[in-house]
Amino acid sequence: MILASGRAGCRTAASPDERPSAERQRRGAVLLTVLVVLALLGLTGLALFAATRAGQEGARRLAAVERVRDAARSAPVALLDGWAGTGFTRLAVGAARDTVLVSLLTGDTLAPTARVRRASPAAFLLASQAAVVGPGTTAFPFARRTTQLVALLVPARLALRAALTSREPLRGDAATLVDGRDTLPEGWACDPADSGSVPAIALPPSATAGLPPGALLGAAPHVLVDSGSADVDRYRLVAPPGTAPAARPRELPSLRGPTVGPRRAADGDCDVAHDDVWGDPARASPCGDYLPLLHVAGDLVAPRGQGQGVLVVDGDLVLDGGFEFLGVVLVGGRVVGGAMPSRVMGALLVRGSGGAPSELGALRVRWSSCVAAGALRAVGGVRPAAARGWQSGG
């Protein structure tokens, strides 16, 4: 029989160097806990940092959107102010102009772009767009705003009582013609329903009309006696209240023998930079919608060609044929017509000087409500449309 030492199936115990001590286990657990806590704190810090950055970015974007909105809304107003008195009546119906309003550039807000388009003889559409560029990019603005504004022309105020109104006596001959029947010229935006005849001439009681019977045509009575006639003070031609001036006067010295007419600029538009461009009443060129306010500080003698709008002559208007003007003509002195025909369509107002009569000669004056209204509208005022003038979009 063989005897085995010790108990069967028993293992020999490991030495102290072969198993971790309780102290080492405790330290490992603490270290692991610390690492987990640090990791959680790091993640929490990152989350808080991201949230803070997101909040700051959101606030910045919100502020940018507000700046864009303000810039987009300010652009049409700035465009309205900038064009008032200089540019509106230079645009033909259907034509448009683009501009960049650098004066409204702030921070990372792009300079707003704006466009003005003449939708009709009396209405303009002003559209603008502003944007903010995000950091590190110039191609993709993260905030954009567009705004549109409708602006309307408001006619200047001037009482028109007859085709020809004078404070002083009138003289004429067989070639003189003053017609108070309404004339609606071709090419003008005339509504026959709005037309109406007026007396041929209007004079105060102290003035006389030495005109042949066949010289006066129009609504009866041909002569309208009115003591308040011919208020031709050019300073009464002011923009209506609440509007900006649609046109400022083109100031001209005394002129002798000027030739006026339309002229096309290099870009194909009406060349309004030249003093001899007075529009195109025939409406055959880009100057057809240009109706300027012309002020001659003295006499206008022997003009030639065609013009339209409002013509104010401080001194005498001396005609010797070959001149045609459609609009409203205001003369501070006398009118002296020559043997050759000249024509005024719209209305003529003569203040006169020293009681000396105007000698009309071969001058032909025809009343046109459409032409007179268009001229006074072009030199009146401009204002935003009262109702629903704004249209905005993101």
Image (cartoon, grey):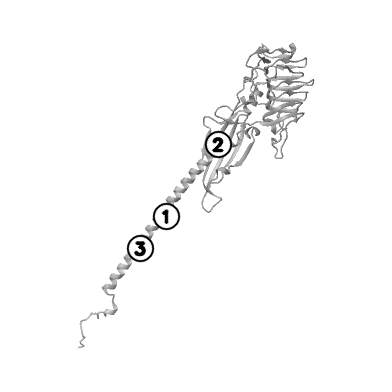
Is residue 281 at all visible to an observer of this figure?
A: no
Q: Are marks 3 and 1 in contact (CB under 8 Å)?
A: no
Instruction: Left or right? Give the position of 295 relative to 55.
Output: right
Percent x, y of residue 76 = 56, 37
Residue most toward the right? 339
Residue most toward the bottom? 1
For disc 2, the marked residue is 77
> What is the CA distance from the residue labelled 1 to the residue labelled 2?
40 Å
Instruction: Left or right? Give the position of 81 relative to 298.
Output: left
Q: Are marks 1 and 2 in contact (CB under 8 Å)?
A: no
Q: Helix or strand or loop: what does disc 2 sit on?
A: helix
Q: Identity of the amino acid at label 3?
A: Leu
For disc 3, the marked residue is 38
Instruction: Left or right? Give the position of 145 relative to 320.
Output: left
> What is the CA distance from the residue labelled 3 to the residue labelled 1?
18 Å
Q: Which mark is residue 107?
A: none
Q: Nearer the viewer, mark 3 or mark 2?
A: 2
Q: Nearer the viewer, mark 1 or mark 2?
A: 2
- Earlier sequence position, callout 3 versus callout 1: 3
Judge whether 132 appears above or below 345 on screen: below
For disc 1, the marked residue is 50
Rendered image quadrant of residue 193 = top right
Q: Identity of the amino acid at label 1?
A: Ala
Quarter of the picture containing the N terminus is bottom left
> Pointer 3: residues within 10 angstroms few (<14), some, or many (20+)?
few
Q: Residue at x 43, y 53 (%)?
A: 53
Q: Helix or strand or loop: what does disc 3 sit on?
A: helix
- Earlier sequence position, callout 1 versus callout 2: 1
Percent x, y of residue 130 = 54, 43
